[in-house]
Amino acid sequence: MTRSAEQAPRPGGRGRAEQHGERFHDLRLRTDEPFTVLYGPGVDDIFVDPDYRVRGLEEVLWRLLRAAGYQRIVYSSLSRPLYFRDADSRRRSRPGEEGRGAQGRAEGPGELMRNPRLSGPLGRLRLGADAAATPAAAAPSPRSVADPFAVMTHHGYLRQRAVRSAVVYTQAAEILRHHQASRQLAGALADQAQDRLGSNRWIFVFRQATLGEVERLVAGQGSYPALSGFLRAQIEQPALGGAFRIGLPEDAELNRLVQQLRLQEGLRVGDWRELEPVLRSFAGRPQRASAWREGLRGLIAEATALDRRAVLERGLATSVTPHDDSPWTRLDAMPGLEPVKQHLRALRAQAEAARGLRARGVISRDPGAHHLLFAGNPGTGKTTVARLVGEIFRDLGLLRRGHLVEAKAPDLVAGFVGQTAERTNALIDRALDGVLFIDEAYTLSDQQHGFGAEAITALVQRMENDRDRLVVVLAGYPAKMAEFFGTNPGLKDRNAAWLDFPDYDPETLHTILLGLLADRGLRPDEAAVDRLRVVLAGMHRVRTADFGNARAVRKLADALFAAWAERVGEELGRPLLPEDLPTEYQDYLPRPAPTAADLLAELDHLVGLPQVREFLTGLADVVALRQARGLELAQPPHLLFLGPPGTGKTTVARLVGRLLHSLGLLHSDKVVEVTRAELVAQYVGQTAPKTQEAVRSALDGVLFIDEAYSLAGGPGGQDFGKEAIDTLVREMQQYPGRLVVIAAGYPREMREFLAANSGLASRFTQTLPFDHYPTADLVEILRRKAEAQRYLLSAEAAQRAAAWFEVRRAAQPRDFGNARAVAGLLQAMELRLARRLRGPGEQEPMTGQVAFTAEDVPPP
């Protein structure tokens, strides 16, 4: 049952209900509510009370009601509309005995009872012999009372305020569905709800898992508006206290079950030191005590002792932490995470201080909430730490159970109005007394039709109302969690502690990998150890926001094991060698710098570009020098390509990406080409994300921005281009060594581009001029393009083409297209050639080369 923090007892307290078992410690039978509703997964379960007796729910309820002062306890089921579990309740149901105790005469089977609502001959009725002197002795009886009479009798008992009475419907769902006097029952319930008949109450036991399911079932009948309204009020205001969820057993009750089976049925315990971790693993699984009893009876039948190995082999638990491995030990063994460890140590000190203050009577309870927010990339240990938090908080007395319930946004959000809150509350109910871990919690803001907001509202309310029974851990990527947390006042007000889970550094990744290899039985030799360290350093250097950390290392360990197993065959004692490193990971290893000749071979098919050749040759020489001296490679520079169109800037940018990759300066040879359209949006606030997306798509490669000067002055006086430039500068600073930005354009306009942000000029440290091609180079480019299409360029055609270039350049000195003009000329020459060679009749295939002549060159 959901309750406010002010009304909930602390885990260490033992109320009257808790004397009958931990699962009833929140049950309140002294409330102003007209009804009490019980529901949840434990309704059909058995219960092991602190006296090591195994009882059913009816008997537990009888004892709880007796302890709360109820003098007459009446039960009703579908097959037995009216019966008692004790003689005193039966006796107080006779005429004239309402105010007397158990000193009256004993009654035997078939005792005549009076309906308090009837007089005359119908006022006495022979009930079946189903009652006995003790609650445990009740036995089934034939159906002897009609539903209308039973309803009048129940209602009459509740109206007699002189005798404190409770009527328990043990099969409430079935009774409401099939009741033969639904109108009379609805009227009695309405009377009960309106008059609030003293402390007398109607108790309904439903087998539904959630209160929302109960409410829908009752509302669906359409016959019991008073009960349906009561249930809606309980859902909307859980602190009213009229609904109680019966959960699953905790380790204390499971321990009593083990002892009961040990003493009465011969269950043997193997290693007593392992009993506590075994029971802790049991309590973390959502299973009824009756199911655990059957599993343990299986051990008895097999004459197998209860210990860690037995429960693992038989599937009674998926994992059992060794008895000498405390959660603090496991936390300390996790690499890194110092901020997390420091926070939990501080929390331990606070909890111990609060325990001491409570012992002195200074305070009565711990008023704080202990919700957490884990911000980190995948594989940084968030889920593992959340599981440890549950155990740690249980050991500190902050949680009674400490189990972990994992969820994501779809587990909380439904597709229809009103169902999301119910689904969220049902999930929280499962996590009560433990930890609710919601991974990628920021996606709740993105759920369809606003249902995610409904889930957040329900979550925030329960984080407050159940703060002494629940720890919520919200987890996700740091930037997204910061945005999610910062824009939600409800979450901020819950005082969830922000804990950073940073990416593991290369040495920590290396330690994790060696441990994983040892777990797989692999023994790497010294050379393999060193090579793996280099690989992990490379993986860390080029990591992105979704870098898997320990998950990525686990994937590498699996790949190494597969390669090693294929190599060694049956010789399993052989070590892991460097040659076992899979091909996809070899890109992270340094490669020898190519020679100047090999490097410039990439440029051999291009004409001219002496400055580009000189720059790349010098870069190769520096890389070779640093490698020879054992130094780390320098970061590749950002470049400015200054020149008119058609001078090879785009072609060279693509080559630079491949060449920087071959030099080992970039992890990838990709080149992402963008213009203003890919960086600048049309509305305020959209340009920065668009620019960031372009930059991050080019990480570990080249981002080529053609006509970059257009960012400095957008059309219509818009300043969105300036926003793109500012974002670009920040991104260049954020990813040093992982990105080369090449900005290209006319020299004069590019000066305006550099002036748009003071940080641009200092980041573009290398400028390469792309001048107009001289006429001779243009003719050579034309010759090469023609030869690529199996055409020859005659001397006369070359001479006339040169004249064509001179005239066109003179006519358009600024906008002359250079290599683009060459492509246009070649297309025109091919058209004229086709017309010249076209003759009458069918054309014979021309398999050889065809020569352009002077007449194929058009006039300029």
Image (cartoon, rainbow, N blue to C red):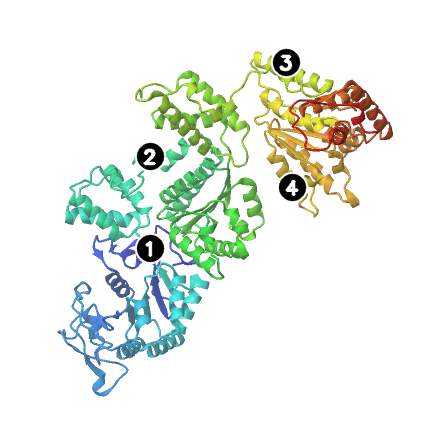
Foreground residue, 424 or 47?
424
Circle 1 residue: 247
Compared with 662, 69 (above or below) is below
Q: How many marks?
A: 4
Q: Amino acid at mark 2?
A: Asp
Mark number, residue 325:
2
Q: Amino acid at mark 3?
A: Ala
Please tell me which of labels 1 and 2 falls first in the chain: 1
Compared with 138, 55 (above or below) is above
Q: The C terminus lies in which quarter of the figure?
A: top right
Secondary structure state at the residue bearing disc 4:
helix
Foreground residue, 833 or 726?
833
Specify whether residue 5 is in view. Answer: no
Please tell me which of labels 4 and 2 falls first in the chain: 2
Foreground residue, 113 or 148?
148
Circle 4 residue: 690
824 relative position to 514: left or right: right
Q: Gap between marks 1 and 2, in whole Å?
A: 28 Å
Foreground residue, 20 or 659?
659
Q: Gap between marks 3 and 1, in whole Å?
A: 76 Å
Please tell me which of labels 1 and 4 falls first in the chain: 1
Q: Gap between marks 1 and 4, in whole Å?
A: 50 Å
Compared with 781, 323 (above or below) is below
Q: Residue at x 51, y 34 (%)?
A: 547
Q: The N terminus lies in which quarter of the figure?
A: bottom left
Secondary structure state at the residue bearing disc 2:
loop
Give the label, 1 or 2, closer to the camera. 1
Mark number, residue 56:
none
Q: Amino acid at mark 4?
A: Lys
Mark number, residue 597:
3
Secondary structure state at the residue bearing disc 3:
helix
Q: Residues within 10 Å of mark 1 (few under 14, many from 20)?
A: many
